[in-house]
Amino acid sequence: MTMTTNPLQDLAAARRNGTPYGITSVCSAHPLVIQAAIRRALADRDAALLIEATCNQVNQFGGYTGMTPDLFVAFVKEVASREGLDASRIIFGGDHLGPNPWKAEPAAQAMGKAEAMVTAYVWAGFSKIHLDASMGCAGEPATLDDETIATRAARLAKAAEKAAGSRGGPMPLYIIGTEVPVPGGADHAISDLKPTEATAARRTIDIHRAIFSREGLEDAFGRVIAVVVQPGVEFGSENVVAYKPGASKQLTALLDQETALVYEAHSTDYQSRAALTALVASGFPILKVGPGLTFALREALYELDLVASEMIAGYGERSLARAMERVMLAAPGHWRSHYHGDETSLYLQRHYSYSDRIRYYWSNPTANVAVARLREALSGVAIPETLMRQFLPALPAELGAAGNPEAILLAAVDRVLADYDAACRPV
């Protein structure tokens, strides 16, 4: 596969030529997830690494991570430098950039903040920009009409173009469109999903093209590389809907007419390697994954918590899990409106939901102390093969002998990344 500097620009051409390949979009700010993704990129010397931040996670006010776009870039580059990865191989993407963090405010105010956020992202070096103004603001319907969405997307594109022009360097690549349900997974059990209708995708493309042209943004629209649609994959709190290629045939056939575009697949978390491979082959080569990575990390942390409970005198019984329960109960804002049921159901969802809203709490100081205590307790301690089989059966038993809990955590995340890497390989 011959790539330009930015492999995102070749995705549509590769599909046209019958040699599709994909790229994994790592949507996480967790240091261990970033470290695992960088190590996997190092193993493939020709691969680019796409790392994305969302509008709620990272923005000019810090988001829930406390990081502005420039701080997020600096954080990722620091990990890359430590691991020996050339930062030029990293593509930074901004996901759902629009008024969503401020949708409780009037549209004029929310859009002003969204423009400032897009500007900050571009100035920080983000080159893949997802324009998403689909959500209603104060006093508006929850879902807006296509013309309003496209008009607001064009307004955000103008801000990005201006920032990129003054910054110098390559101009941004754009993603348009959104998907239903909202990012992060559904908050209820789901049994089936219909892919986006081809007519709806056609309308999204046509209206954006027309309004960008009206606003003098033809050149910017020429750098729209993908449309976010619903391919028929999703995860709820307790279940996952797998991809069915046959259900999206009409949708993917539209790409035979819009030959400069591909689709971007959100919520591909927890899909099998076969399903991910089928997504890439069908026309969904940009595979976003976030909660699935931190879910795997949480699994490994809790498994090590059990190991330490069995092996280490004075560690206590499930010390980490109990600390996380206290943290989540003390600050329920990230899960209360998303999880439902009796107290037992809420407890199980807090810790084990596919939505993985526990990921919002790992940066909490109490959580940091609990994780550090776990890692310190097992550092230099050889975990017997029998305990590895009992509590970490998906990982090689020899990993336990090294006495390196960090290596176990990274391996757990890498198992997920390996499926994406295999699915993204050229056909």
Image (spheres, rainbow, N blue to C red):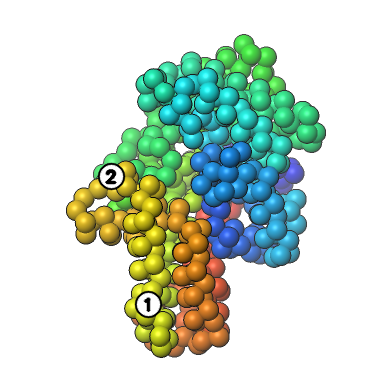
- Percent position (x, y) of residue 31? 58, 60
User: In the displayed structure, would residue 408 be above or below residue 253?
Assistant: below
As drawn, the residue found furthest toward the front would be: 330
As drawn, the label of residue 188 is: 2
Q: Residue at x 49, y 21 (%)?
A: 107
- Percent position (x, y) of residue 272? 42, 55
- Percent position (x, y) of residue 403? 54, 84
Q: Residues within 10 Å of mark 2 (few under 14, many from 20)?
A: some
Q: Residue at x 52, y 55 (%)?
A: 420
Of helix, strand and loop, which one carries label 2? loop
Q: For the residues carrying marks 2 and 1, which lies nearer the camera in this image?
A: 1
User: In the displayed structure, would residue 59 be above or below residue 145?
Assistant: below
Is 112 or 402 nearer to us in this picture? 112
- Percent position (x, y) of residue 318? 36, 74
Is 283 or 204 nearer to us in this picture? 204
Is 250 or 136 nearer to us in this picture? 136
Is 130 or 418 nearer to us in this picture? 130
330 relative to 98 in the view: left or right: left
Q: Which residue does the numbered mark 1 point to in the structure image?
A: 306
Can residue 152 be seen here? yes
Q: Amino acid at mark 2?
A: His
As drawn, the residue found furthest toward the left would be: 342
User: In the displayed structure, would residue 270 be above or below residue 32?
Assistant: above
Q: How far apart are the alpha carbons under marks 2 and 1? A: 29 Å
On the image, which quarter does residue 320 sit in? bottom left
Q: Amino acid at mark 1?
A: Leu
